[in-house]
Amino acid sequence: MKFKMFYLLFLIVTVAKAQVINIPDTNLKAALLAASAANSIAFDSSGSAIVIDANGNGQIELSEADAVRSLNISDKSINSMEGLQYFSDLQYLDCAANNLTALNASGYPQLRYLYCNSNVVTTLTLNGLYHLVELDCSYNNIASLDFTGLQSLSTADCSENLLTSLDFSGCPMLADFSCNNNDITTINIKNGAVQGAVYTYNSWGNNPLAYICTDEDEIAAVNIMLTQNGYSGVNVNTYCSLTPGGDYNTITGALIFDVNNNGCGPEDMPRCFVKLAITNGIDTSYNFTNEQGGYNFYTREGDFSVLPDFENDAFYSAAPSQATISFPVVDNSVATQNFCVTPNGVKSDVEVVMVPLSRAVPGQPARYKVVYKNKGNTEVDGTVSCTWNYDTFRNISNVYPAPSNVGVNLYQWNFANLQPFENREIIMTLTVNNTTDTTPVNIGDALPFTAHVDFTGSDALPADNDFALGHKVQAAQQLNYIQCLEGEALPDSAMDNYLHYVISFTNTGADVARNVVISQRFDVEEYDISTLEVLNSSHPTVARLANGIAQFTMEGANVAEGNGHGDILIKIKPKRPGRPARQVNGMASITFDYEAPISTNTETTVFETLSVDEHELDISVVIYPNPASGIIKIAADNLVSSVELYDIQGRLLQAVIVNDVHLDIDLSARASGLYFVKVRTEKGIKVEKIIKQ
């Protein structure tokens, strides 16, 4: 009985070994049967030319197919590759110059070299070809290619097809590729394989190419290659994804504020725009939490320290206060590190900023935003107010949310339950007077606004409870720009304070802008980059700072076509150089989807001693009483155009357009101390120190 079972098993195995492969295409079968040691059709694992039909029965069997490693069946008038999938150990396949209309190469998992050029292929399937090194599919009718998972691909030629895009993001070994004479508009080579030189094989000509997404380190080389291929005006950047190309490691997590001081749990809300720092002991970069309180750092191998970096560091404790994560190699590892933040005592601190969202142009609407943020560690209730000169505006519209109270030159909004780290905003539109109105507004005028925040209890840092804005009137709108809200000229003492920048953008294109990326480079000789804070944004934003470059990515912003707006509000401290006068320069670039970046204006702020040259001095200006406890009076022989009030740190507290020879300024609500009053007349300027009692 045992002998019979053994014999039956032997028979089954023998039949299986001799199983014949069905090959319907007669030309393919003829080519395989023609293989011999004397030609170059088939080779085995040792590189020797072989006969495929080893037993000479005129058929190709599984065991015979298993012996083949390399196959050259080019120019054989083959119409179908059916049956060749059983050559499962094939590493080299040349089927060029045939009549193939479709090719599923996924049946050859060991394939390293594939040449299927000069056919009429419309569908080429490459799934699972993890070992594929070289591909030539040129001169076909292929409309799309999926390179996902081709992690060994080094060279590709897909010229002379019908392709509209190429995505090599999953090909970290790619060295060069050709794609001449397609209909390609976008190419993604952000894959960690840095194109560091111009190779002969990088041939991309005769495509309506508009955008290439690359790794950061290869942008310059790609631009050279574009020039070599006859292109100009192609946009090259890294913004097609928020993650790096190729392999990397990730440190991720969330920052949660423990509202009830009973341990972080699901009842505690995440906090947006809280800064975290990461360092490897040499370089430091920063990341700001998103709307879900999450953050991501992308790293190479090494030891990294991650810690929350609070603006008011003494107000909070974090658990852990610092985390150390080690990655011995780069292998796409993910380390999760959450931080639970608790208050140190009870500290209240709220700041307010008055933000212009458009230029002020005579006779045109101007948009404004009042931003207020809780920098303390306890929730607060209070009131935000905004004052301006009603006479310089024709009307007020689109105020949201609606004010709680409206007075003479004053709007007020009550707020409740403003949480630590939370920011809120008030949007309004005001139409500026024209040059011919009863109260004319002329180019060069400064429209004065003052925002104030007040709340129950005392503020630990009250200096930022007020914000004065002098909105300079322009001749025309500017759709994409950066503005320093403190102005163009500040006293030297203001270098110890934050400068606030708003970057405003407008989508003038014909399509919705799905993604917007704002990039701002800070000169480390001019700015203390460790002080950067993000206060508010029009859309959900991922904010990062590394190597002096801040990047604000608004993924999924969907900014409306034609006139859709957006903005981001940041603040940063200048770096004091140890000399009495200097300047800082702010400029940003704005990228909508895959369009070329738009450069903003350069915003220059000059720091200088708060004084004037003798030839500018108007000695007729008189300011009294001094010292003063309430009202100060200003009088001059010449027409006064504007008055500005500064504190001892050089912060502009109030700006008033006058157009008279007399003016009263009320200091009664100001804290006791030293102030500067700067009066500008038609003849000159007078700056005087005032003591508030």
Image (spheres, grey):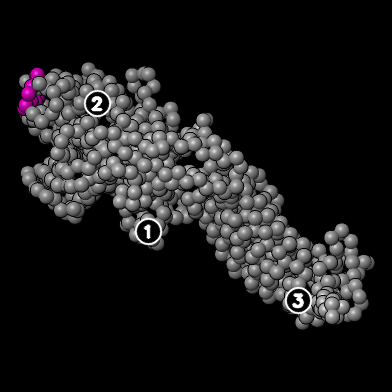
Closest to the observer, 551 or 219: 551
Q: Position of residue 35 (x, y in %)?
A: 88, 71
- Quarter of the image containing the C terminus? top left
Mark 3, residue position: 83
Dot 3: within a 10 Å radius of its alpha carbon, few (fewer than 14), some, or many (20 or more) residues? some
Helix, strand or loop at label 3? It is loop
The magenta-colored residue range is 626-637
Closest to the observer, 518 or 530: 530
Mark 1, residue position: 558
Instruction: Tell which circle, 3 or 2, labels the residue nearer the N-terminal end.
Output: 3
* Residue drawn at 31 percent across, 48 percent down: 268
Counting every numbered tag in the picture gives 3
**What is the number of the mark on residue 434?**
none
Query: Which mark is nearer the camera, 3 or 2?
Result: 3
Query: Which mark is nearer the camera, 3 or 1?
Result: 3
Q: Mark 3–mark 1 contact, CB under 8 Å?
A: no
Q: Quadrant of residue 599?
A: top left
Q: Position of residue 70 (x, y in %)?
A: 81, 64
Q: Is residue 636 magenta?
A: yes
* Residue drawn at 39 percent across, 30 percent down: 528
Q: Is residue 619 above or below residue 152?
A: above
Q: Is residue 462 above or below residue 621?
A: below
